[in-house]
Amino acid sequence: MQAWRRPGRWLALWWLVGALAHAESYTLHLDPASVITYEATTPFERWRGQAPVASLSGSFDDRDVAGSLRLTVTLEPGAFRSGIAIRDINAQRTVFRTDAYPLITFTLTQAELAGPLPPGSTQAARVTGTLAMHGVERTITVPVTVRRAQNALTATGAFAVRLSDYDMHRPSFLFVTVDDTVRLEFDITARLEPG
């Protein structure tokens, strides 16, 4: 009992209680500047298309960001724009088949971070989740760079998907077929709301 009368022990206990009291939980809200970009190629051409993120929902707790992170991101493939309208219409009708599959969804199942993510920090991370596209669901793992501001969380990164893995038709233009592998890049920002 005498040991707890030492000022150092009381200060340590006070710091611990204060830290726990100020640990925050946050809900995530989509920043409308968030975008997904695809890059497709043929043997003779490379082009990019971009679409805004349609929706985002999630939450995390500062006491265990990786363990508590919940995240679902939704994209409307019909919103992709490459700068050539006929190409976009063809992609909507024959590749994405947006009439039957109007949404692409990523649902996070696991996040790997090296440690805490306080405001002002940047960290390399890995996220694993289910990518649902064209009626097919597959588990993917993606490297991510996460930046934490005072009131926002930004995730950037890139990964490749094979159209054949999702039973998607590879379009042809003048007998030139698009490569099976398409690169996807993301730049997603979520505003943080305590609670």
Image: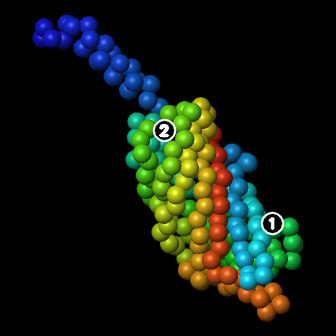
Q: Residues within 10 Å of mark 1 (few under 14, many from 20)?
A: some
**37 sits to left or right of 10:** right
Which residue does the image show at 15% across and 11% down from the upper left? 3
Residue 65's disc is: none
Residue 157 or 64: which is nearer the viewer? 157
1 vs 2, front mark: 2
Q: Do residues under tags 1 and 2 come within 8 Å of each other at their CB atoms?
A: no
Q: How is the image coloured?
A: rainbow
What is the three-letter code of the residue carrying label 2?
A: Leu
- Residue 151 vs 102, above or below: the answer is above
Q: Tell me the quarter of the image containing the N terminus.
A: top left
The image quadrant of residue 84 is bottom right
Query: Furthest-bottom residue in view?
Result: 175
**19 sits to left or right of 129:** left
Percent from the top left, x then y, of residue 98? 71, 74
Would you name the residue on which mark 1 appears?
Answer: 81
The image quadrant of residue 194 is top right
Residue 117's disc is: 2
Percent from the top left, x then y, of residue 156? 61, 52
